[in-house]
Image: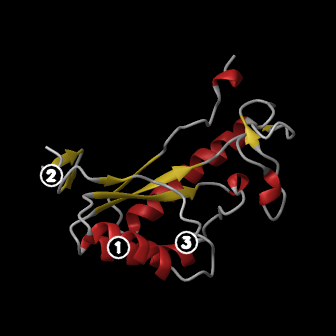
Amino acid sequence: MLLTPIDLGPVNVQNRVVSTAHGSFLDFYRPGIAPDQYVAYQERRARGGCGLIVLQAMLVHRSSQTIGQWMWERDDVLPKLELMADRLHKNGTQVFVQLAHYGAQFRSDGNADLIPLWGFSPMLSPSGWEPSHEMTTEEVEEVLKGYEQTAAVALEAGLDGFGDSCRARVPSSAVV
């Protein structure tokens, strides 16, 4: 069963071996950084037989930057993603990317311009010391537009799909 193909919507995956999204700390999305290390990192998994690789989180809005997470720039990231798609597809591997906005998670001091954390309510971050900025309707729409733009860039680059983990974006303690 593990080595049999599976259809994920319109995407046919050669087997059910999946490398899920996880941090690599290789600054792939950071503008001006060469993609070689992260591409090689994922290419080794593709050569090893992964049917689907989900790339590490790609931020959808600058308010979500944190330590080791960078907001991409279109002209920089498009050729990086094209290279990734090409290399992994040559091994028969499908490529998705995880889209992310961390909401009130993490810390804003990892963000060079110290944009406050954006969340649905003014709650304390899990670090326990920083309250989030309660997003306005316009800011929620701005983040949603970021998801749309990020997904469009991924598909334009030749990636096969995208998703959002939805983990801990709105902790149960924040749902009223």
Real-space CA distance between mark 1 and mark 2, rounded to the nearest whole angstrom = 19 Å
Q: Earlier in the sequence, mark 1 or mark 2?
A: 2
Residue mark closest to the camera, 3 vs 2: 2
Is the Cβ of the residue at disc 1 closer than 8 Å to that at disc 2? no
Q: Tell me the residue at 68%/42% (across/down).
A: 103
How many marks overall?
Answer: 3
Q: Which residue is mark 1?
A: 43
Q: Which residue is mark 2?
A: 3
Q: Residue 101: x, y in percent?
A: 62, 47
Mark 2 residue element: loop
**Which numbered disc covers residue 28?**
3
Q: Tell me the residue at 49%/42% (across/down).
A: 165
Residue mark closest to the camera, 1 vs 3: 1
Amino acid type of disc 3? Phe
Quadrant in which residue 68 is drawn: bottom right
Q: Residue 25: x, y in percent?
A: 59, 66
Q: Tell me the residue at 31%/53% (across/down).
A: 18
Real-space CA distance between mark 1 and mark 3, rounded to the nearest whole angstrom = 14 Å
Real-space CA distance between mark 3 and mark 2, rounded to the nearest whole angstrom = 30 Å
Q: Give the class, few, some or many, for how many residues have Cα within 10 Å of label 2's Cα (few <14, many ≥20).
A: few
Amino acid type of disc 2? Leu
Q: Earlier in the sequence, mark 3 or mark 2?
A: 2
Q: Earlier in the sequence, mark 1 or mark 3?
A: 3
Q: Give the class, few, some or many, for how many residues have Cα within 10 Å of label 1's Cα (few <14, many ≥20).
A: many
Q: Which image quarter holds the N terminus? A: top left
In the image, is residue 38 above or below residue 113? below
Mark 1 residue element: helix
Q: Residue 138: x, y in percent?
A: 71, 41
Amino acid type of disc 1? Glu
Is the Cβ of the residue at disc 1 closer than 8 Å to that at disc 3? no
41 or 167: nearer the viewer: 41
